[in-house]
Amino acid sequence: MLSSPITVTINAVDRVLPRINNDNYSSVYRLKWTDNELTVTIRHSYEGKVGPSQMERHNVDMVHNIVDAQGVTKTYQTYTVFRFPRSSAATVSVQDVTGLNAWVTANVAAIAAWES
């Protein structure tokens, strides 16, 4: 189990999110401040029938809600999903996720500007 709280750094500011729920292979972390709410949900599951083709699925979802001066909530969502055969070690997926996240981090501004 991950420790609580978790720290997510956004725009050079550490946001410390305490765990607010933990059950059934998932955890939810949340922090509220001024007009912001940041929630990180981590879920684990299996896909398919038990056997060599069954997949492990791991999902990390971050939702950032910001209420503007007019009282309108704007929602920003970022998530990652990775899957691999239950019958194999996670090593390749861990390496793939690490590599892809580094590439996305280096190119996120271009991607947000619709470059592909």
Image: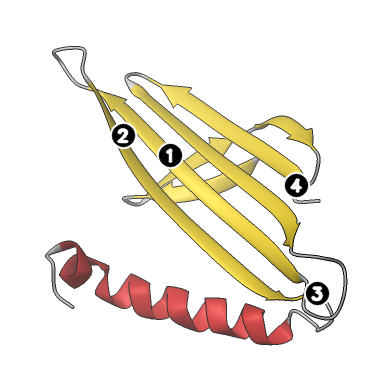
Residue on which the image places disc 3: 86
Give the alpha-carbon distance from disc 2 to disc 3, as whole Å. 34 Å
Q: What amino acid does circle 4 point to?
A: Ser
Horizontal relation, residue 84 to residue 110: left or right: right
Residue on which the image places disc 2: 75
Give the alpha-carbon distance from disc 3 to disc 1, as whole Å. 28 Å
Closest to the observer, 39 or 87:
87
First of labels 2, 4 by sequence position: 4
Give the alpha-carbon distance from disc 4 to disc 3, as whole Å. 25 Å
Q: Nearer the viewer, mark 4 or mark 1?
A: 1
Above or below, 19 relative to 35:
below
Give the alpha-carbon distance from disc 2 to disc 4, as whole Å. 26 Å
Image quadrant of residue 29?
A: top right
First of labels 2, 1 by sequence position: 1
Residue on which the image places disc 1: 63
What residue do we see at 56% from left, 83% from top?
96
Q: What is the number of the mark on residue 3?
A: 4
Q: Nearer the viewer, mark 2 or mark 4?
A: 2
Q: What amino acid does circle 2 point to?
A: Thr
Q: What amino acid does circle 3 point to?
A: Arg
